[in-house]
Image (cartoon, rainbow, N blue to C red):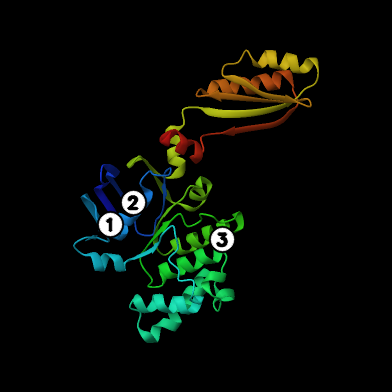
Amino acid sequence: MIEIKGVTKKFGEITAVKGISFAVKKGEVLGFLGPNGAGKTTTMKLITGFWQADQGQVLIDGLDNVTHSKESRAKIGYLPETVPLYDEMKVYEYLRFIASIRDITPEMILPRIKEVVEICNLHSVIGKSLDELSKGYRQRVGLAQAIMHNPDILILDEPTTGLDPNQIAEIRELIKKIGKEKTVIFSTHILAEAQATCDRVVIINKGQIVAEGRPEELAQALKSQELVTLKLRAKGSEVTTALATLADLKNIKIVSEEAGLTTVTMESSARDEGVALGELLVKRAWPVCELVRGGVSLEEVFRELTK
């Protein structure tokens, strides 16, 4: 549905994106991740045709977005980081205006507004002025304008910036709902949001793609060790004995000792070291309060690839 082929964009002496290439399939929700200044917004503006690449090519459903600019842009709905609203308008007036400039026929404007209001849950604010709306509702109206012409592709630049946790959850569910029918690219700094919402992620840093794949695949690729966290209930001399015994194992680190509860972590790439820990626990019959086995999170992947 979207193909980015060797795209480069410069601003004076600064190269914002450096020969990047990736593709997004039809019906896929792609998370576009990267630190500030990595090139996320530049890439999104290149996809939408807002800017033209200095080198490379952007294809929208097989169409070059320079030589077939009008046709390719008609397939895209775009929500920039700053929502393009006219505060003096009421919500209904604004949506009607967007419908008219998107070439929706007069007889279909009202039915389409009703559909969009239903999708974005704008019933309670339809008669309000845009300057009266909360940040969350402004984002909903922004999404409404992006999908008004029923595009095949949605490009969302930081759609949850400045929202509270409840609003973030609402927008996340809305993106997942829309993503069932459309191809979606959205950028975010909230990695848990990407992990919960995206089919796949692309991580960009300093204008270059540094990783691409499903969140769990990226974590697995980076995973060089397994982390085991153990909490033991021990008192007095038992603590000293436990720590001395555990210290004989490889890669053991004592995190804390508090109120008779000793927290221990073991980082290991060898499965037999984890087995050794289990055998030791059974042999000593220590009261185990908690034993958690985990791998590398998307946040750890992000930090490792963009540091």
Q: Residue type at mark 2?
A: Thr
Residue 79 visible in the current orientation = yes
Left or right of 102: which side holds 292?
A: right
Residue 51 bears which disc, if any?
1
Q: Which residue is mark 2?
A: 42
How many residues crowd mark 3 within 10 Å: few (<14), some (14–19), many (20+)? some
Choose between 75 and 165: the one closer to the eye.
165
Figure quadrant of the N terminus = bottom left
Name the outermost residue toward the left. 67
Q: Residue type at mark 1?
A: Trp
**Disc 3 vs disc 1: which is toward the camera?**
1
Name the residue located 78 percent from the left edge and 25 percent from the top edge: 260
Choose between 75 and 182: the one closer to the eye.
75
Toward which corner of the image does residue 77 lie, by quadrant? bottom left
Q: Residue type at mark 3?
A: Glu
Q: Which residue is mark 3?
A: 170
